[in-house]
């Protein structure tokens, strides 16, 4: 193979480690990841962006995919994908639900139905482990409680201008053993300790 046909790999996995290690990279090249995360988060935390502004900027096909994607892909999953599904429901479920809430009430019921589709699909597969089953059961319980609360006509939130933060008061109503509630509480503790530093 000639040198023109070879792929040049500019970034090696160790390059990231090099940049984040002050002893190896020196002051000139050192990147403090935590400082950059804080610097990126600060302006976003102070912006007052309404849920309506967010919804208006998201193309309809992206909204539909965010809601219906899991159901579309069920038939493509196999037992090798259970780890990825478990991570989605364990670590990213609340972020996913925040996106759905931002999209508005018309997507909430669809989302709840799709989550139930995933739950029933997992129940039918003998290879699905108990951790995955329990995690999805807890996610469905959380989604059901949150969505029912948000769609309740007596709810204190504005149904026409839902905000991602509207889901969090409902999490406290879930059983203490619910993995979604526990994950959120752990995240809250980590955020409090990071802010107090």
Image (cartoon, rainbow, N blue to C red):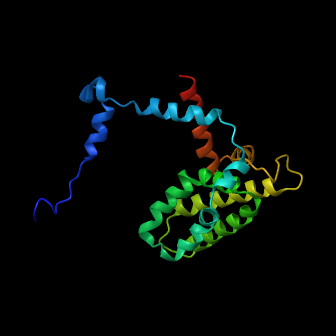
Q: Residue furthest front?
A: 4
Quadrant including the N terminus: bottom left
Instruction: Judge from the rendering whether residue 24 lies leftward or rightward of residue 165; answer left or right.
Output: left
Residue at the image point whose x is 30% and y is 34% from the top = 19
Above/below status of 79 relative to 31: below
Q: Position of residue 69 (x, y in %)?
A: 57, 67
**Between 44 and 75, which is closer to the camera in this rendering?**
44
Residue at the image point whose x is 17% and y is 60% from the top = 6
**Between 134 and 192, which is closer to the camera in this rendering?**
192
Instruction: Judge from the rendering whether residue 100 lies leftward or rightward of residue 27; answer left or right.
Output: right
**Between 141 and 50, which is closer to the camera in this rendering?**
50
Q: Position of residue 56 (x, y in %)?
A: 69, 55
Asked which quadrant contains residue 151, the reply is bottom right
Instruction: Judge from the rendering whether residue 92 lies leftward or rightward of residue 143; answer left or right.
Output: left
**Between 111 and 134, which is closer to the camera in this rendering?**
111
Residue at the image point whose x is 15% and y is 60% from the top = 4
Above/below status of 9 relative to 31: below
Residue at the image point whose x is 50% and y is 56% from the top = 87
Q: Residue furthest left?
A: 2
Instruction: Judge from the rendering whether residue 162 lies leftward or rightward of residue 19; answer left or right.
Output: right
Q: Position of residue 171 (x, y in %)?
A: 70, 47
Q: Position of residue 185 (x, y in %)?
A: 62, 40
């Amino acid at each position: 193979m000639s040198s023109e046909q070879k792929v040049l790999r500019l970034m090696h996995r160790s390059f990231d480690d090099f940049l984040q290690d002050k002893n190896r990279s020196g002051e000139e090249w050192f990147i403090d990841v935590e400082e950059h995360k804080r610097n990126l988060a600060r302006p976003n935390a102070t912006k007052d962006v309404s849920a309506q502004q967010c919804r208006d900027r998201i193309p309809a096909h992206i909204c539909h995919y965010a809601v219906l994607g899991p159901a579309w892909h069920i038939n493509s999953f196999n037992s090798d994908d259970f780890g990825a599904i478990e991570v989605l429901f364990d670590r990213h479920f609340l972020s996913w639900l925040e996106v759905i809430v931002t999209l508005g009430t018309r997507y909430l019921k669809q989302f709840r139905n799709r989550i139930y589709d995933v739950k029933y699909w997992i129940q039918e597969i003998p290879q699905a482990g108990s951790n995955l089953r329990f995690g999805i059961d807890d996610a469905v319980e959380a989604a059901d409680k949150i969505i029912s609360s948000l769609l309740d006509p007596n709810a204190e939130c504005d149904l026409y201008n839902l905000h991602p933060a509207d889901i969090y008061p409902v999490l406290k109503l879930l059983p203490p053993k619910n993995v979604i509630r526990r994950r959120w509480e752990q995240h809250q503790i980590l955020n409090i300790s990071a802010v107090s530093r």
